Amino acid sequence: MKRSAVRILLFSILFIMISNFLSAQGLLPIWVNGKWGFIDNTGKVIVTPVYDYAFPTSDGMNMVKEGAKFGYVNSEGKAIISPKFTEAYPFVGGIARIKMKDFYAYINKVGQIIANADYQEAYDLIDGLARIKLNGKYGYINGIGETVIQPKFANAGDFQQGYAMVKLAQTVTVKSVFHFDQSFFDESLYSVYPEKTLVQNMLLNGYIGKNGEIKIPFQYKDARDFSEGLAAVVTTNAGGYGKWGYINLKGQMVIPSQFDAALDFHEGLAAVRIGNRWGYIDRDGKFVITPQFSFADDFQEGIARINIGGRITLNGKCFSGKWGFVDKSGNMICPVIFDWVSRFEGGLARVELNGQMGIMNKEGKYKVNEKVEYIYPVFNGLARVKSAGKFGYLSDTGALKLKVQYLQAADFKNGLALVLLKTNQNYTLAYIDKTGAPKWQTGANLRYPFDPGNVLNVLCPTGLWLYDKPSMDTKKIVNIPYGESVTFKKKSQKKELLRSHGLIGGWLFVQFRTVEGYIFEGYLSKLPAPLYGMGLENYFTEKIGLIYQTEFERIDDENEDYYKAFNLGVELHKEVIGGKKTYNYTVPGISMQEAFVLVKHCMGFSFMAMPDYEAVESKLVSETQVDTCSVKVYRNSPTDITRIEMIITTRGAEIAIKILTSGDIVTITMEQI
């Protein structure tokens, strides 16, 4: 019996180890003709593309989407939880957050709902516990869905080092009314009323343990999470807007309140601000680097980024000014001359100088290249580099590993990276290994006119009829619903051009499932059908697939400028000019009619007609009688459209949309009026 028990235990351990290994490897999403599936890290197709969207592996599970519903497949590609949730999130610690109707719940890896109490908010499992909000109060559940800390807090954070920062209403005596939330990085935002003694209820911060016990009483006006055994706090007895100090895990004030702002400890030092200048203190509260910077970042690998003359956003990001690096002794390892720098990772940092990108080592030696537009972070030992509009990969030492040749490229994950190649007019979407060898690939062309063998999607809201001959006077075979696909066989010899809602096209001979016949080409596209009113950015993210985007820390929160690259060569650049948002999409290979149909479906005007003649305006009022849309079209001939202009009025705001063509590229520009 003992030997059998040991054998079972060993097999159990081995199974867990293998499962963890497979989970760590994970599956990678693939896109074919508008549908999503998965491959493993050898390039083997594990799940044939059948889903409307697919997500990378998290905790051994992959989210998938069918229509507007979410489900999950496991690391072997088996559909474990069918798509049925209106909102879902990746698995973390064996459980996942999902939304049913208006409330959140948690499920385990076999789809069982383990915590369902109509949560208003739900968060991932961190350090063994997950935050939830019920009836306006916050509490915590464990990994099997049990409520271990009852919801009673006005606010709550995640557990760090066994402690969680929470807020609770308390009656206190204070010297003045205190406003802080928007003043963390800029003194000009402080609001302080004349000092006087007041007794009032305030939401104060304290710290609890994993059983809900109070570790440190509620006595702080503001507080941060623990890091390296210390947490920054502002006490209730502080006058005016208060000063920051640091407490230890026993709640003892070990660094007195004296700072106008204070960040977490990293590698034994913390950035603090006095007035409008940042410096660094040690664990004894002594300045090791005197306040002198406009911005000071956390230390990483013994070096920290600093800025002089920059602008700090309310989210703590720094823009403009000049950047450099400082070591723990306060020595500048390079001149403060750079337009931007990254943190050090693996002994190297990325730097930008006068619009040129390069690499710097810890000795402060750097090299920028006028041909390099951007260098991305290192993943799996390689970093993407962009030059002259194309991508290659650098090694973690900064040497060119894979030559610059890809139209688009993603970071390496599980030893593979998704890239887009263009040869002549043909696009190829592929996963490559670290030698550049393709492990999986597929054609990814949107090119118009269509070629025999192309899979085309029906974008007509009422569906398209399949006829037995190229004439509407002949027998109707079947109505092909919106979103279904057909395979193009050949173009009809009949020269007649048909018109439908302003769209012009001929007859195509196609196959739909097991039947063949003729269909109007005006509502056909290689692009997958969008969900009604889903918006263009969401459409390209979910239906085409995001490859990469602007790094989060480089997105200016106040201006919201950013860039996104999608499969099939689709790109988006969002910018704010004069307070107005402008979205510029470039889509290669589609026709102007396809672009028009795509925009009207994504914007929620599925039945909007295109005018038949040049510069003639067509208008439509939506079902709500609130939103309106007008269209102008400019043509060289019935089939040669040069420009489309749309004005959409929605909820009192006006959006101007222009669709233009240049070569094989269609540009869609959306801006607020």
Image (cartoon, grey):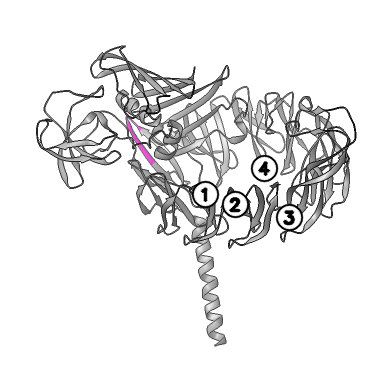
Q: Which mark is drawn over residue 161?
A: 3
Instruction: Please rate how many residues cluster around mark 1, counting C-alpha atoms within 10 Å: few if below 14, some from 14 to 19, many from 20.
Output: many
Q: Is residue 426 magenta?
A: yes
**First reached walking from the N terminus: tag 2 or tag 4:** 2
Q: Is the residue under label 4 in contact with that under label 2 (CB below 8 Å)? A: no
SS under mark 1 = loop
Give the label, 4 or 3, closer to the camera. Answer: 3
**First reached walking from the N terminus: tag 1 or tag 2:** 1
Mark 1 — residue?
Answer: 89
- The three-letter code of the residue at mark 2 reads Asp
Residue 650: quarter of image:
top left
- The three-letter code of the residue at mark 3 reads Gln
**First reached walking from the N terminus: tag 1 or tag 4:** 1
**First reached walking from the N terminus: tag 2 or tag 3:** 2
- The three-letter code of the residue at mark 4 reads Gly
Instruction: Please rate how many residues cluster around mark 3, counting C-alpha atoms within 10 Å: few if below 14, some from 14 to 19, many from 20.
Output: some
Mark 4 — residue?
Answer: 347
Q: Is the residue under label 2 in contact with that under label 1 (CB below 8 Å)? A: yes
- The three-letter code of the residue at mark 1 reads Tyr
Q: CA distance from mark 2 to mark 4?
A: 32 Å
Viewer-proximal residue, 608 or 495? 608
At horizontal 50% and vertical 65% (from top left) the residue drawn is 18
Mark 2 — residue?
Answer: 124
Viewer-proximal residue, 49 or 663? 49
Residue 121 in picture, x, y percent from top left: 59, 47
Instruction: Please rate how many residues cluster around mark 4, counting C-alpha atoms within 10 Å: few if below 14, some from 14 to 19, many from 20.
Output: some
Residue 210 in picture, x, y percent from top left: 71, 59
Residue 76: quarter of image:
bottom left
Q: CA distance from mark 4 to mark 3?
A: 28 Å
SS under mark 3 = loop
